[in-house]
Image (spheres, grey):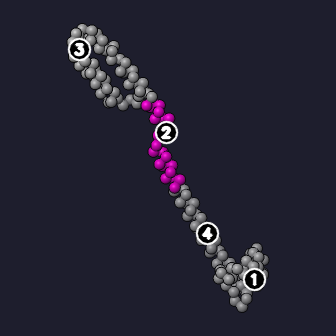
Amino acid sequence: MALIRKSEYARRQGFSKSYVSKLIKQSKISVCDGMIDEDKANARNDLKKQLLEAKLNTEIYKGQILEAQANKIASQYISAEVVKKAVQAKNRIVRDTLLQIPDRVSSVIASLKDASEIHALLMTEIRNTLFELSNDTTV
């Protein structure tokens, strides 16, 4: 047990004497007959440093977990640009397929004289085309 004066403890720790007095008043350093047990005071400070390091490591670990969770969530989403390109490609297919209807039915329509038959033929062709497009998984 090495008892030293407050001023000597302050000098060794790089503190001011008034700061050491403040630590004593806050019961963070104990004194015996006006002297400080340097080993006890340092041991207490070392424990506080270890506790602060443990808390810091815990916060760093929590941050890493949150970052990993954010990356996992972000990886579940598709970029708007990819979606936009896929929609444009699908729209081109729909457009091209619908524009093929007149070529397929024009000769049949030319032979029909009844408007209801023409209407039924067009509706059937459009429905069939839309059904095919809804089952198309190429895009």
Residue 86 in magenta?
A: yes
Q: Within the image, what quadrant is residue 32 found in?
A: bottom right
Residue at the far front: name it.
115
The residue singled out by tag 2 in the image is 79
The residue singled out by tag 3 in the image is 115
Between the residue at mark 3 and the residue at mark 4, the CA separation in whole angstroms equals: 87 Å
Residue 12 visible, this angle: no
Q: Earlier in the sequence, mark 1 or mark 2?
A: 1
Question: Given the image, on which type of amino acid does mark 3 rest?
Answer: Ala
Numbered disc total: 4
Q: Earlier in the sequence, mark 1 or mark 4?
A: 1
Answer with left or right where residue 20 lies relative to residue 116. Answer: right
The residue singled out by tag 1 in the image is 6
Compared to residue 129, the image places residue 111 above or below, namely above
Q: Few, some or many C-alpha atoms within 10 Å of disc 1 (few <14, some 14-19, many ≥20)? A: many
Q: Earlier in the sequence, mark 1 or mark 3?
A: 1
Between the residue at mark 4 and the residue at mark 2, the CA separation in whole angstroms equals: 41 Å
Between the residue at mark 1 and the residue at mark 4, the CA separation in whole angstroms equals: 25 Å
Between the residue at mark 1 and the residue at mark 3, the CA separation in whole angstroms equals: 110 Å
